Image (tube, rainbow, N blue to C red):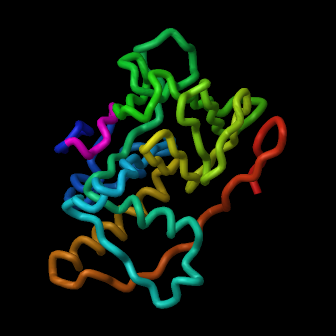
Amino acid sequence: MRTATAMKGCNVKSSPGVSLEEIVKTHNFDSRKLWGNQALLLVKTMRTKCAATSTRHVHVATRDTQRTPYAWNKYLGYISSSAFVVPVAKTTKNNLDKTIILGRAISADIRLVSPTVSRTHAYLHPPTERLGIWRIEDVSSMNGTYVNNLRIPLTTKAHIGASDEIRIGDIGMLFLDSHVLQNIIGYARKAWTSLDEGPEQIDIGFPEPEHTFLVTDATDTKML
């Protein structure tokens, strides 16, 4: 299975990671068995010129686009051959105990190689006994860190959960669990099979998202 590497100057170089396209091609692949309850990121470049040259990026039409769940509108943009699945896990590449570093530096736990990403761009804080939810914090980065299009203020830790979208520079990430990812894999497989057979658009339905996005206050963010 192809790991995440830079490809023709457009794909995100993220480490560690597995190509979404390779996952879709793998018969009977089950993300729930491989990753269980582990948090995951579905990562891709948001650069327009790169998305346009992607070998597999399908536009999915629905019967009623006004009623398409908000989360699935986000998912569709990530059903692309330029996307990679990255497990959210601590490594031994730095001295931080449990905090996961996202950035361009070699010492980052999740390395995102792009000139728009700072060396140490953001921290992912795992759930604790007191606060059982993931949080993300911007580390005084040049271009900021966004959750669902809202910029995280400095010194603020934003709550994140399944289906939330994170943007760091020109890299977009969906924060997922293995169950949501398995749904995305199923629709990607259906979309790309239809694309191989000729139609440029397919008509599919969408399951309801588990919850909605975030709102912020002066000190922290709250889950709706």
Residue sitting at x 17%, y 44%? 8
Q: Residue furthest top?
A: 95
Answer left or right for 165 relative to 110. Answer: right
> On screen, 120 above or below 72?
above
Residue sitting at x 26%, y 46%? 10
Does the magenta segment cover residue 73? no
Q: Residue furthest right?
A: 218
Quarter of the picture containing the C terminus is bottom right
> On screen, 158 above or below 30?
above
* Quarter residue 200 falls in: bottom left
Q: Residue 120: where, in percent of width, then height?
A: 49, 22
Q: Nearer the viewer, residue 137 or 149?
A: 149
Residue sitting at x 23%, y 38%? 6
Identify the main secondary structure in magenta: loop
Q: Nearer the viewer, residue 111 or 133?
A: 111
Answer left or right for 170 relative to 199. Answer: right
Quarter of the picture containing the N terminus is top left
Q: Residue 57: where, in percent of width, then height?
A: 28, 65
Q: Nearer the viewer, residue 117 or 112?
A: 117
Q: Nearer the viewer, residue 4 or 176?
A: 4
Answer left or right for 189 relative to 60. Answer: left
> On screen, 219 above or below 58?
above
**Residue range highlighted in magenta:** 9-16
Q: Residue 61: where, in percent of width, then height?
A: 40, 83
Residue sitting at x 62%, y 35%? 136
Q: How many marks?
A: 0
Answer left or right for 212 relative to 189. Answer: right
Q: Residue 158: where, in percent of width, then height?
A: 69, 39
